[in-house]
Amino acid sequence: MKRVVHTGLPEFGRPTEHAVMANGHLRTTAVPLKMDGTFETGDARSQIAVALDNLETTVKAAGGAVTDVIQALCFLTSADHVPVLNEEWTKRFKPPYPNRGIVIVNAIGVPGIVILIQVHAYIEP
């Protein structure tokens, strides 16, 4: 049975949950949403840092840690952001790293946003 994970992150007016758990499997999408409910629209580094902060907050709210992340799919609006993502990623994750894919897209659903991260984590029930 699935359940919503209450992350403490602000709602942002879309028909979706920040995170859902089912049988130890966490599914979440991290974006650069600030605690005041607005989006970080600064440079790529600041957006990536906020998105990764939100990811960590979400995994902790589900009862896990970033070491429980097994797969991530990162959507970026430019390949130029990949080195920045890699730098910020290694500040949060240590080997063995989660499996990760990167997709370069024209835009993400909020104007000015350069990153969206979809994550699958397994947290022992």
Image (tube, grey):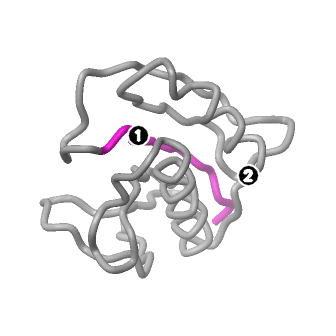
Q: Amino acid at mark 2?
A: Arg
Q: Main secondary structure of the magenta part?
A: strand
Q: Is residue 56 magenta?
A: no
* CA gap, disc 1 and disc 2: 16 Å
The image shows residue 110 at horizontal and vertical percentages of 20, 47
* Badge 1 or badge 2: first in the primary sequence: 2
Query: Residue at left 48%, top 54%?
Result: 51
How many tags in the picture?
2
Q: Quadrant of the C terminus?
A: bottom right
Query: Relative to 94, is 84 on the left or the right?
Result: left
Which segment did they paint magenta? 113-125
The image shows residue 77 at horizontal and vertical percentages of 35, 27
| In front of the other: 71 or 45 | 45
**Which image quadrant for residue 116?**
top left
Query: Residue at left 31%, top 77%?
Result: 10
What residue is pinned by disc 1? 115
The image shows residue 113 at horizontal and vertical percentages of 31, 44
Query: Residue at left 23%, top 30%?
Result: 107
User: Measured along the vertical axis of the image, is residue 85 above or below residue 91?
Assistant: above
Q: Amino acid at mark 1?
A: Ile
Residue furthest to the right in view is: 95
Secondary structure beneath dot 1 equals: strand
Instruction: Point out which mark residue 9 bears.
Output: none
What residue is pinned by disc 2? 92
Query: Residue at left 41%, top 22%?
Result: 78
Query: Relative to 76, is 67 on the left or the right?
Result: right
**In this view of the protein, can residue 1 be seen by the observer?**
no
Quick one: label 1, few (<14), some, or many (20+) residues within 10 Å? many
Query: Relative to 28, is 41 on the left or the right?
Result: left
Secondary structure beneath dot 2 equals: helix
